[in-house]
Amino acid sequence: MVQAAWQLKAEKCRKVLQDSLNPAWLLPASELPPPDHLNVADFPDKCTLLEPRELEITKKNGVDLLAEMAAGTLTAVETTTAFLKRAHIGHQLLNFATEFLVEDALARAVELDAYYKSTGRLVGPLHGLPISVKEHVAIKDHICHSCYIAWTDNVATEDALLVKLLRNAGAVIHVRTNAPQSLMHIDCDNVIYGPTVNPHNRKLTPGGSSGGEGASLGFRCAVLGVGTDIGGSVRVPAAFCGAYGLRTTALRNPYKGVVLAGDGQESIRCVISPLANSIADINLFQKAILDQEPWEEETSLVPLPWKQAPPAKVDGITVGVIWDDGVVHPHPPVSRGLRRAVEKLKAAGVKVVDFEPYEHARGWDILAALYFPDAAKLQKDILAEGGEPVAPLTTWAFNYARPEPLTVAENWELNVRREAYRADYHRVMKERGVDFILCPAYLGVASELATGQYWLYTAIWNILDQPCVAFPTGLKAEPSIDVVEADYQPRSTDDEREYKKYVPSKFTDAPISLQLVGKHFRDEDTVAAADLVSKIVQG
Amino acid sequence: MVQAAWQLKAEKCRKVLQDSLNPAWLLPASELPPPDHLNVADFPDKCTLLEPRELEITKKNGVDLLAEMAAGTLTAVETTTAFLKRAHIGHQLLNFATEFLVEDALARAVELDAYYKSTGRLVGPLHGLPISVKEHVAIKDHICHSCYIAWTDNVATEDALLVKLLRNAGAVIHVRTNAPQSLMHIDCDNVIYGPTVNPHNRKLTPGGSSGGEGASLGFRCAVLGVGTDIGGSVRVPAAFCGAYGLRTTALRNPYKGVVLAGDGQESIRCVISPLANSIADINLFQKAILDQEPWEEETSLVPLPWKQAPPAKVDGITVGVIWDDGVVHPHPPVSRGLRRAVEKLKAAGVKVVDFEPYEHARGWDILAALYFPDAAKLQKDILAEGGEPVAPLTTWAFNYARPEPLTVAENWELNVRREAYRADYHRVMKERGVDFILCPAYLGVASELATGQYWLYTAIWNILDQPCVAFPTGLKAEPSIDVVEADYQPRSTDDEREYKKYVPSKFTDAPISLQLVGKHFRDEDTVAAADLVSKIVQG
């Protein structure tokens, strides 16, 4: 049968991926776990590929690796090799990569080691740290298609600004990662690479849209990851995969060079920000980037350095808890995680109060209209140009849009409503004396493949432009404990649809994660509070 | 003859103005200068209304008045009375006010004095300083029509946020000021109040759109003034009237409560900012406002306090000079003022270099399309609703718009072009080693009534979102010196139209002003540099 043109283009991209793998680091099928082995998070401990020393390296966080490299007890080549090898295993199990950068990464690591050897100093604050990067963040001379077939001939002429700054800081970019069609799913599947799956339960999605990043960090294929977030696309994958994910306030991190349909849409800004395996590494990333004053090149950014916030204190913060957003009720494991977190925080002496969510449905009404003010015509045209089949989740997302394109004046009106909602929410937080909000990062622990339809637990903070950190509680979904609430009465069709998706046995081993939300532009304070809160919750 | 409905509404507003005047402070017609007496700037010195002490008070700047009030040698009532009386004369001569707030102002002054008397302290950093406010900035319980007949029943339910903060700081709001129809003229005429004129030459406009503010500060009717600027509307009137005018970077000063058609239009933001008679007073104003953290209420603002910038040093800055924007050639008095300024700066040891303007026509192409993305439908509808005659300058401004409304996607494309232009301009300034740009604030010293059509000398910095200060050079247009350049060849029809407007005798006594431009978000540094530069230029 003759392949359609779109299939040939998809094939070309898959070949790029295939050719980028180092065959020596791939395990034979016989050594891989069988498909019904769902939780593969600890597979690297059992397989033969990683040397004990490599295994040890990949279990460390960035700040510790950096300290060793500064002390000369670890090289960038060792570090890069270890993470590249682990990422190869990860890819075999999870299908998370769109392209490996083996040669570039190792060449850079060699340079870094040479620099250290000759000067005794590190190149920069991210010296030798392997970082995975979401596919639509431009890498010079590489295809950057944003998961659109129509864009598969788009070769980036320069690195995205954030990538440049990461490289300046000594980071090693070693793998590019998968994302969903349209980049507007909390799932991670497209016609080129197929679905990425969750390291803790391969029947579940790693989340999205930065799903490849979720898998990358959840499987420790990288020290840090670069994702983008316009509705939860960093935090959802971090939460589903048991990693940490930051959404900064807009206009702080350099966004230039992110390839996304709808450039110039400023009503709801997409942000670029890190995933990590510790809060300390998130801080490290942010400081390394903002110390380079990206606003000197990307002038739309606000020139705010990344201040070193003082550590948050147990008796210095008030945390408001959103148990349920009033629209869609959380699944039992998430509610259990939240209950347990609140108990621990209270026991530790943190002031915790219930926080009635402030009109989240109002926020969604504005946000949904602003995601695709042109009735998603731009995206639909790109999909049509590529000729690729359109996934149901893509259609689902496009249907958030009003049926007809907004006029410019209607867009203005929504901007006004957005500003009023932001100001109201800020006022309400102040009136209630709440510094931070603790809430679910998603209604459940994760979703099954191709089923995620409700993002408002994260997206509400996108319309509010408040900084948030998703973090793991250390707990996992357990079917025997997290039983369906027998008496739960759905409050709406949306609520019913989502609650019905909760079948305890399907979510075994999925990490229970939460989200800590701070105030607009208080990113540093939010990260500092997330450090305190996550440690207490995990303790 | 029966009056049209719009005339009745205009009449109602004029009655509000008329009733707000204190008849005791109005001079009989016989004591007013005749209409052909054009320069009335020093009339207060000659007339009988102001006592010598009052005259003295109105000649002082804010920081000095404040020092006297802090020392107890001057009261707020004396200060307010003096400026109210001078403003009455000013209104008789210039028609600059839309409403006096005599009772409110004096009542507030009494309160301030009582507070000082009982505590020995000032209420705040603007204690007792009379401030004039452009009409479309809301004052609680007063009509706020933005010069639209259709809006003449719009009574503000609360003060604009900036007004609240001014009052908190101890300021006395004593007069509201005129603006042009549509607020998109660099002129100051509308069907309600008629034209405001320039204190230095009453055949000239005070500029616009904050023209009433220009006249207010130029005639010293107020210590500080509040204007708004989306294309030069603060700087043009300041320049035409010999005052100082700041345009801040967007999202620094609180804008909430400004009544303007097109709320939610964010592609080119209108800013609210001060006019003054000294740079020190501009600093005083900015610090008084931003010290109150307006971002806690207006959450779209960037939370950047007004830092006290170190004084700029003669050998610490490089100033690039734009002699001509490459689109429309300046008139001879402006070129003379600029030449003289450069000579003085060089003589003082400041590094001054020529700065070839970077693609200003490109900037205008983007900006003109973004002023009215809806083809000015909103404004046209409001004018039609009011039934008022549409002024030629209004039609002129609306014709900047493309004939058909932009789609949302076309608006995005222009946003992208705007961002690219901003980044390019910033890069060019850095490559050329230029910290600040010195340039005309307008192609001429002022324009005759109802003739101003070219704003790009100011508007280019609106699309670039760079902070600027307009300031007087201390020179005035002199027909005998500022002769028409005999050999000047117009470069375009726009250029020819504007150059033909220069008839030396028409501009006698108009102040020659200039504009100093800084980098995006470097507002404090720009004000500090303007302090140094203006003092050298005036020295």
Image (tube, coloured by chain):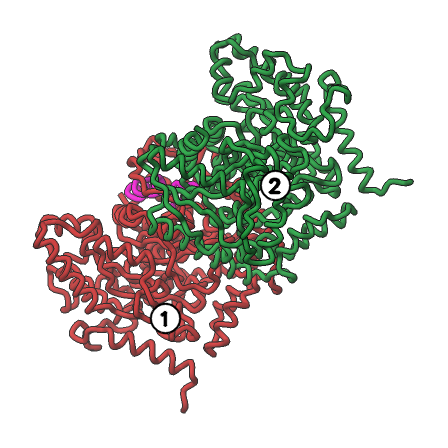
Chain colours: A green, B red
Instruction: Look at the image and say whether residue B516 sits in the magenta stretch.
Output: yes
Query: Which residues are the magenta region?
Result: B514-536
Q: What residue type is labelled 1?
A: Pro
The N terminus of chain A is located in which quarter? top right
Same chain? Circles 1 and 2? no
Q: Residue at x 66, y 25 (%)?
A: A90
In the image, taking residue A265 as reference, residue A25 lies left or right, namely: right
Question: Circle 2 sits in a helix, a strand or a loop, which is it?
Answer: helix
Coordinates of residue A451 in the picture (x, y in percent): 66, 46
Q: Which of B255 and B366 is in front in this view?
A: B255
The residue at which mark 1 appears reads as: B195
The C terminus of chain A is located in which quarter? top left
Local crowd at mark 2 within 10 Å, few (<14), some, or many (≥20)?
Answer: some
Q: Nearer the viewer, residue B271 or A10?
A: A10
Instruction: Look at the image and say whether residue B72 sits in the magenta stretch.
Output: no
Q: Which residue is drawn at 29% across and 48% down?
A: B292
The residue at which mark 2 appears reads as: A504
Q: Residue at x 38, y 64 (%)?
A: B506
Q: What residue type is labelled 2?
A: Pro
Number of numbered discs visible in the structure rendering: 2
Chain for mark 2? Answer: A
Local crowd at mark 1 within 10 Å, few (<14), some, or many (≥20)?
Answer: many
As displayed, is residue B252 above or below residue B507?
above
The span from disc 1 to disc 2 (Cα, nearest Å) is: 75 Å
In the image, taking residue B509 as reference, residue A73 lies left or right, namely: right
